[in-house]
């Protein structure tokens, strides 16, 4: 079986999602026979996976890839971990211009229509896409490699951290009033921000902004190991379809970096091990004042991750999905011939 992934990124880096979901598994086990590149491979694979929108700049490039798969009887798989179809309505101001959002929406509709198989990162996303892509589909959650687990030794002062890109500024602001009150109330508590930079508009808050300049997921993990020692991580999310379709990757990240988390009580985090914020100030205050409980909560989260969410222990999940797709190749090609014509 030959499998190729067209990853999200450019000539200088592989996007984090593509690296976590496809490249790491292929490095961990020879049972995942993946090759990868930014475009069409120089051979004919059995399965071609398009991860996210992989930085495709032109709509015609997407059409070319789809036609190439059809002409060479290659099973086209689209893998996503973001709800691009809900982007325009739920996140219209996330730092993208209207034209960019429309292009992403149009491209995603095309993949949803013509891909033979869809792979989703969570159940909510799969359910949302049913109306657009009623075909063979799988839910493949995110996993993390054991080598990225960092058990930290914490000491005072207490550090609260937030990790997120500038597109999640509005989500971060959900917790901002409580954070400001916490910093005023507890002089031994500090705030550190990673990724969001200084892009908080007119908001000015006392925080250390990590100046990370790496270009790969491996760089990111090395930086986290050497420079971050948080006690509490926060994950505020506005409740809408776009955010409900996200994964619990921040729970994996926070647990891997050695801290407990306080999470919005929305779909990605409803079943994770951490505190759910009905009141951000109260939950943070409780954790600040209860070191023993923080340790207990972290150990519980770590135990779950080590038992259930390590990529090293879940290679068979990938193997079963690939084997199932390959076994159904003739049937998928038949379905393709009967109901799809590319114009």
Image: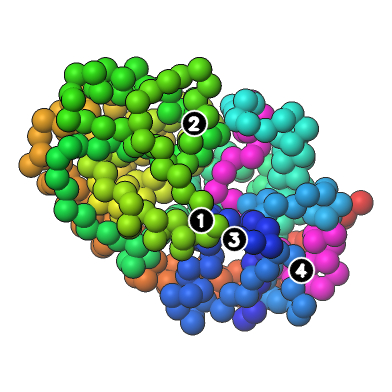
The span from disc 1 to disc 4 (Cα, nearest Å) is 27 Å
Q: Earlier in the sequence, mark 2 or mark 4?
A: 4
Instruction: Please indicate, yes or no, whether residue 133 appears anywhere in the rendered image.
Output: yes
Return the x and y of residue 305 as percentages of the image width and height: 28, 57
Q: Is residue 152 magenta?
A: no
- Which residue bears the numbered disc 4? 40
Confirm whether the magenta stretch covers residue 86.
yes
Dot 3 lies on which element? loop
Instruction: Compute the Cα span from label 1 to label 2.
Output: 18 Å
Instruction: Report whether residue 234 is seen.
Output: no
Neighbour class for label 3 at 10 Å: few (<14), some, many (≥20)?
A: many
Specify whether 232 is left or right of 218: left
Residue 214 is marked as 1
What span is colored magenta in the figure?
64-89
Q: Residue at x 71, y 76 (%)?
A: 45
- Verify CB contact (< 8 Å) between mark 2 and mark 3: no
Q: Is residue 178 above or below residue 273?
A: above
Q: Which residue is mark 2?
A: 198
């Amino acid at each position: 079986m030959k499998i190729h992934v067209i990853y999200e990124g450019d000539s200088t880096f592989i996007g984090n999602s593509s690296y976590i979901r496809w490249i790491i598994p292929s490095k961990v086990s020879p049972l995942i026979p993946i090759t990868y590149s930014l475009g069409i491979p120089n051979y004919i694979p059995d399965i071609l996976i398009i991860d996210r929108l992989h930085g495709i700049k032109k709509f015609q490039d997407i059409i070319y890839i789809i036609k190439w798969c059809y002409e060479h009887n290659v099973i086209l798989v689209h893998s996503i971990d973001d709800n691009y179809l809900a982007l325009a309505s739920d996140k219209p101001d996330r730092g993208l211009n209207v034209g960019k959002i429309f292009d992403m929406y149009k491209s995603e509709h095309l993949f949803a229509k013509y891909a033979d198989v869809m792979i989703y990162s969570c159940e909510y996303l799969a359910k949302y896409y049913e109306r657009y892509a009623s075909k063979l589909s799988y839910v493949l959650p995110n996993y993390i490699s054991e080598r990225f687990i960092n058990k930290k030794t914490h000491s005072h002062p207490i550090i609260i951290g937030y990790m997120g890109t500038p597109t999640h500024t509005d989500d971060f602001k959900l917790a901002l009033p409580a954070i400001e009150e916490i910093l005023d109330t507890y002089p031994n508590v500090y705030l550190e921000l990673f990724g969001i930079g200084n892009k908080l508009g007119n908001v000015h808050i006392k925080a250390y902004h990590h100046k990370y300049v790496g270009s790969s997921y491996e760089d990111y993990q090395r930086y986290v190991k050497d420079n971050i020692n948080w006690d509490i991580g926060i994950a505020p999310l506005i409740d809408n379809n776009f955010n409900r379709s996200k994964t619990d990757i921040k729970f994996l990240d926070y647990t891997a970096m050695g801290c407990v988390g306080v999470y919005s009580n929305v779909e990605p985090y409803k079943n994770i091990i951490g505190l759910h914020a009905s009141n951000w100030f109260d939950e943070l205050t409780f954790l600040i004042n209860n070191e023993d409980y923080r340790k207990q909560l972290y150990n519980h989260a770590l135990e779950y991750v080590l038992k259930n969410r390590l990529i090293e222990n879940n290679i068979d999940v990938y193997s079963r999905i690939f084997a199932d797709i390959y076994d159904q190749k003739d049937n998928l090609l038949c379905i393709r011939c009967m109901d799809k014509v590319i114009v």
